[in-house]
Image: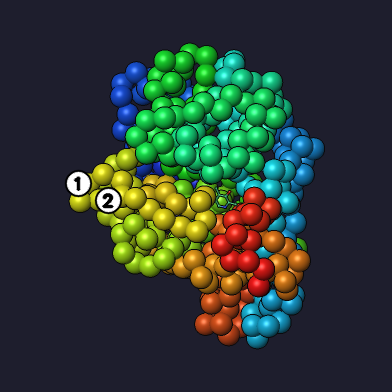
Amino acid sequence: MRYNEIEFDTYLKNYPDNDGYYGRYGGCYIPDDLKKAMAEINEAYFTIAKSSKFIGELRRIRREFQGRPTPISYLERLSGSLGNVQLYAKREDLNHTGAHKLNHCMGEALLAKYMGKKKVIAETGAGQHGVALATAAAYFGLECDIYMGKVDIQKQAPNVARMKILGANVIEVTHGLQTLKEAVDAAFEAYTKEYRDAIYCIGSVVGPHPFPMMVRDFQSVVGIEAREQFLEMTGELPDAVVACVGGGSNAMGMFSGFLNDPVKIYGVEPLGRGTALGDHAASLKYGTEGIMHGFNSIMLKDENGDPAPVYSVASGLDYPSSGPEHAFLHDIGRVQYDVINDDDTIDAFFKLSRMEGIIPAIESSHAVAYAIQLAQKMGRGSVLICLSGRGDKDMDYIIEKYGIR
Ligand SMILES: *Cc1c(COP(=O)(O)O)cnc(C)c1O
């Protein structure tokens, strides 16, 4: 199937199908007792989260607590240095807690509250998802258990402190490599025992159905706002939209606003140190179809067919797969997925800081770097970048590894 055979005006209603599939990707590949829990969440999502009461409350929270709508900034000096292409940034760095992740955490935690759950459970790698969820749990008065590998706990001390200050329990995972993969296993195991009182909150558009759909829908506020704001600012739609892709939630939020428009859409994956397996996390570019963490998508595999080790300078992008909807949009050709390496990312990080007074997250710097290259190829037109988060969390790492340029 190609994208010109798909009706994009009704796309968001028709994808995924009732079983959570986007074409061949998605689904719900988990043990039977957890399938019951997913069915309960799915049911609650379609009844509670589509009610006007829920939508109204989430809208108020977005405005009064998160500080939405976030603005679009015209990147005047950066654009001026590139010729005749105008670059714009959707400022998710100005969303409360400094990144887009709170958009779906507030939705998931509000749903938990409406479902009468007392606790939210999640895993975290670098700690960004853990901090966003701990924030949402504090806001709603829910307990919060965050599973984190011992190695990551040692590496991410400031985020661990944030989660604890926000009242979350950070549970150390000490088996295997003691990083994200083990944390996912431990969190799922806990959830299997606690699902009557708790809800699992996934950190991106990944995992078993209904999570990829729910997280996309909660993130779609980014694309809806951006489309309206861009039209109001310029009287036109952008020629191109660019976002970085780890699991793919900021990108799906942004892209969902433009799928039905004559707008080119680019997802940017991390090429890290290079194309050898283990040196990057560009799953859509170099991966193959497979099932992991409860869903079917395109993933990077090792020689045994297990999730391969991955690397990126941006800890929020080093995931060996991407959400099933990205795999689908990739296959049908609606979104073009491309890569940016560490070096170009760091150049873009300093460029945006120096030329615009915006210090971007290293994750978001991948999108900035790609937009700069795209602008040079396009020659004229406009590019809207999803600036998924701010770089405050990356200061120590940048100074230690790269110094001040
Ligand atoms: C976590 C994170 C990402 C990657 O997650 P997606 O689900 O791919 O959006 C990107 N940018 C920032 C700032 C993040 O914290």
Q: Is residue 203 visible?
A: no
Q: Secondary structure at mark 2?
A: loop
Q: Nearer the viewer, residue 39 or 319?
A: 319
Q: Nearer the viewer, residue 215 or 165?
A: 165
Q: Position of residue 16 (x, y in %)?
A: 41, 42
Q: Is mark 1 within 8 Å of ligand 1?
A: no
Image quadrant in which the N terminus is located: bottom left
Q: Nearer the viewer, residue 74 or 23?
A: 74
Q: How is the image coloured?
A: rainbow
Report crowding for label 2: few under 14, some 14 to 19, many 20 or more residues within 10 A (C-alpha): many
Q: Are marks 1 and 2 in contact (CB under 8 Å)?
A: yes
Above or below, comparing residue 404 to residue 198 in the picture: below
Report crowding for label 1: few under 14, some 14 to 19, many 20 or more residues within 10 A (C-alpha): few
Q: Position of residue 244 (x, y in %)?
A: 52, 59
What's under tag 1, amino acid-wise? Asn
Describe residue 212's horizontal placement relative to residue 136 as left or right: left
* Residue at figure coordinates x 56%, y 82% from the top left: 376
Residue that mark 2 sits on:
301
| Alpha carbon distance from label 1 to label 2 | 7 Å
Above or below, comparing residue 110 to residue 276 in the picture: above
Q: Position of residue 185 (x, y in %)?
A: 38, 30
Residue that mark 1 sits on:
304
What's under tag 2, amino acid-wise? Lys
